[in-house]
Structures are given as structure tokens and as C-alpha cells.
């Protein structure tokens, strides 16, 4: 095999593969990448047995042995390639080793037996979901902060997908806060179904879209193939497959408040700045108190620690309705919810001091963030 391709695309493929590759002492083959020639393309594959990825790269095949395969250590290959800066890179196999040349640099990598590399499965279903790639990327990035990958309940460590016709709800929760984003499919799935994808899979799907390997292909849609125990994501020449999380997702809709005794609209930037500064004085439970003052049309923020002292501020609201209310939150979780709200102004809906609050952009109707208060 003798193959020339763009260095930028090769870097992205190798880095994606290196992230997926497993660090398994009992199966050291998983810490490697499989590189396979396919006519005028090469395929880079990686797996940790829970997630697998295949990336096809176009280029110029100068010499080819049909379906030639080599297995190369992922980490050293990624480290070498990431230091290169030329426009193109040459891959050549010689004496069962891989030689890479780019500019004035050359490296020769020892390879392993490709027959030991695990087969990456493929889905059997032809039913698929199509969604705009940028929209699902942004949706995942807004929901992921509400998830704890170390939660004791496995179903809470993943991202919940709930499909109904052309509507997809993407949900994340750690039982203290919850984020839900609703998006429209570009096709009609026609069936009602739901599933939970692992936290790490959601991260890699978002990164896969951001990397946009072979971007000249200009694929606007991510195609998703769900099955009973696995799921596949296709974007152009990249295919990522993952196991699903088995478990029953909680009936979260019941905790989402529909009506509010207190409603506030406030400048997002000012509120974020206030929470960050006052939050420096939060106690060990990270608590910050918000006090609503409708008479003065303002919110007061206070945090206090017996060791460091006390921080406080007040900020004017755009609108405020309801009664006086003092409520305490984990300031980090509060920051997460306000940060992912869209627009210049954020809506805050409150009821009692022990009831969940709702956060969203002032004009948003397809996203919400629900946060439980701290009971002091």
C-alpha cells in the first residue's frame, strides 16, 4: 500500500480513533488502530468493545494490495501525526511495517497481526433517524452538563432520546438537575421509541460532528440507526457504533413545573457574572441564596462561608412577577443552567423554596433546565 491523503483529515481520523481505542491490559490489541486499504481509500478503525468507529479517507492510492490491513499503536501514531504541519501525508507499508512521510519527517511503525483486531459490528436495521448535524451537536452540548457519568444508577449516566414522529427530545439528568432539548427530524421516523446512549458516546458524537472529517463532502445530516441493544451514527464517511444502556429512564416529565408563582427575566451576562463572583464565598455545599424583591424589581444574591467570609450583590431585572422569595441552589449547577440558555436574557420560574425551578432563554420554547433547590 502506498497512499497519499490530506494531513488535516488524517489527523482528525487518527485522533478520533485514538480516543475510542481501549486501554485494556487483558486485550492490548484494543490500544491499536486498524488501517485498511479499500481501492482509492483507506479505512481507519478503532474500538474498545463498547464503542467502535470506522473512518474512510479519500486520497490517491499509488500502490495497493487488495484489502491490505495493518494494526498500529494508536497513541504513538497520534502523537507523531499531531506534530506534523505539511499539507499532505504519505502512508506506505514495507516489510509489514507502516512508514509515514510528511515534509522532512519520516517514521516507521511496527505493526501487529490484523487477524487479532476485533470485528466492529454493524446494525441490521434500515430504519433511520435524520437530524441536522449542527442542531444535534448543540443539543448534546446543552444537555450533557446535567449528567453525572458516575451516577449509581446506570440509566442516569447516559443521554435519553425520546422519539415521536418527527420530534426528538434529548434529555439528561443526575436527579438534582435536568435538561431537555426538543428538535425536529429531517425525516419521519413514524414510530415512537426511546433509548439511552452512554455519556461517552454522546461526547464522541459531538466531537465527530465538530471534527467534520472530509468536510468537502458537505453532509448536513447525521443519520442514526437505533436497534434494541446498539446504535449507529453515520456522518459522511464516518461510522460510529455503540452499545446502548439497558434500563428504564425515570418519568421525568412530572417534575417539570408548568406554572409559576414567581417569574423573573434578567440579563444573562450580568447574572452569570454575579453568580461567579458571589459563588466564591459559597460554603462546602456550594450554596448561594437568591432573594426575589418584586418591590425593587431586583434579585439579591448572597453566599457565606465561616472560613472565607461573605459575598453579596443585587441586580436589576427586566421583569419580575410574584412575591418575595428566598431560595438556595448549588451555584455550580445554577451556572450550568444559565450558561446553556440561549439569548441575552434568561427566564427563571420559581414556586416554593423547596420546589424545583425552571431556567431557559427568554424566548426559548424548545429547551428547559430544571434545578432542585438545596434544603438548608
Image (cartoon, grey):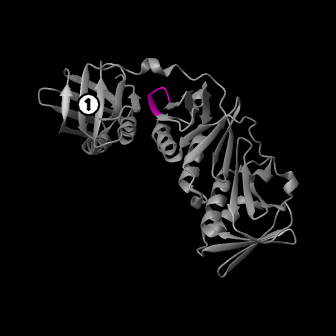
| Residue 217, placed above or below residue 224 | below
Query: What segment is highlighted magenta in the picture?
Result: 174-182
Residue situated furthest bottom in the rendering: 104
For the image, the number of numbered tags is: 1
| Residue 163, placed above or below residue 52 | above
The verdict on residue 258 being magenta is: no
Q: Position of residue 288 (x, y in %)?
A: 31, 33
| Image quadrant assignment for residue 212 | bottom right
Left or right of 163: which side holds 287?
left
Q: Secondary structure at mark 1?
A: strand
Q: Position of residue 140 (x, y in %)?
A: 50, 40
- Please name the predominant secondary structure of the magenta segment in the image: strand
Residue name at image x 19 percent, y 31 percent: 319
| Residue 195, placed above or below residue 22 | above
Q: Position of residue 329 (x, y in %)?
A: 34, 30
Left or right of 251: which side holds 278?
left
Left or right of 22: which side holds 139?
left
The verdict on residue 181 being magenta is: yes
* Front-most of residues 304 and 348: 348
Badge 1: how crowded within 10 Å, few (<14), some, or many (20+)?
Answer: some
Instruction: Quarter of the image for the N terminus: give it.
Output: bottom right
Q: Is residue 268 visible?
A: yes
Residue name at image x 84 percent, y 62 percent: 68
Q: Which residue is mark 1?
A: 290
Residue name at image x 61 percent, y 29 percent: 195
Amino acid at each position: 500500500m502506498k497512499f497519499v491523503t490530506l494531513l488535516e483529515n488524517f489527523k482528525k481520523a487518527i485522533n478520533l480513533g485514538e480516543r475510542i481505542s481501549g486501554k485494556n491490559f487483558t486485550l492490548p490489541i484494543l490500544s491499536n488502530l486498524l488501517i485498511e486499504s479499500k481501492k482509492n481509500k483507506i479505512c481507519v478503525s478503532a474500538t474498545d468493545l463498547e464503542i467502535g468507529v470506522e473512518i474512510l479517507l479519500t486520497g490517491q492510492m499509488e500502490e495497493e494490495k487488495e484489502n491490505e490491513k495493518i494494526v498500529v499503536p494508536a497513541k504513538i501514531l497520534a502523537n507523531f501525526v499531531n506534530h506534523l504541519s505539511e499539507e499532505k501525508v504519505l502512508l506506505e507499508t514495507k516489510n509489514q511495517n507502516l512508514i509515514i512521510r510528511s515534509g522532512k519527517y519520516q517514521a516507521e511503525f511496527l505493526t501487529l497481526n490484523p487477524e487479532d483486531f476485533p470485528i466492529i459490528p454493524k446494525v441490521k436495521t434500515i430504519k433511520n433517524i435524520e437530524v441536522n448535524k449542527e442542531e444535534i451537536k448543540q443539543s448534546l452540548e446543552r444537555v450533557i452538563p446535567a449528567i453525572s457519568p458516575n451516577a449509581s444508577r446506570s440509566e442516569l449516566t447516559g443521554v435519553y432520546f425520546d422519539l415521536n414522529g418527527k420530534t426528538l427530545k434529548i434529555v439528561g439528568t443526575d436527579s438534582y438537575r435536568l435538561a431537555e432539548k426538543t428538535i425536529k427530524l429531517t425525516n419521519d421516523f413514524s414510530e415512537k421509541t426511546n433509548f439511552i446512549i452512554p455519556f461517552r458516546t454522546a461526547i464522541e458524537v459531538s466531537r465527530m460532528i465538530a471534527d467534520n472529517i472530509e468536510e468537502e463532502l458537505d453532509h448536513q445530516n447525521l443519520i442514526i440507526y437505533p436497534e434494541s441493544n446498539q446504535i449507529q451514527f453515520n456522518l459522511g464517511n464516518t461510522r460510529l457504533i455503540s452499545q446502548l444502556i439497558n434500563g428504564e429512564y425515570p418519568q421525568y416529565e412530572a417534575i417539570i413545573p408548568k406554572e409559576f408563582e414567581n417569574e423573573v427575566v434578567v440579563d444573562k451576562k450580568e447574572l452569570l457574572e454575579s453568580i461567579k463572583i458571589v459563588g466564591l464565598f459559597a460554603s462546602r455545599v456550594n450554596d448561594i441564596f437568591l432573594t426575589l424583591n418584586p418591590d425593587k424589581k431586583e434579585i439579591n444574591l448572597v453566599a457565606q462561608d465561616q472560613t472565607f467570609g461573605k459575598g453579596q450583590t443585587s441586580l436589576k431585572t427586566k421583569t419580575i412577577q410574584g412575591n418575595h422569595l428566598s431560595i438556595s441552589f448549588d451555584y455550580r449547577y445554577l451556572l450550568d443552567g444559565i450558561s446553556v440558555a440561549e439569548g441575552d436574557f434568561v427566564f427563571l420560574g420559581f414556586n416554593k423554596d423547596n420546589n424545583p425551578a425552571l431556567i431557559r432563554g427568554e424566548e426559548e420554547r424548545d429547551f428547559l433546565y430544571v434545578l432542585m433547590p438545596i434544603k438548608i
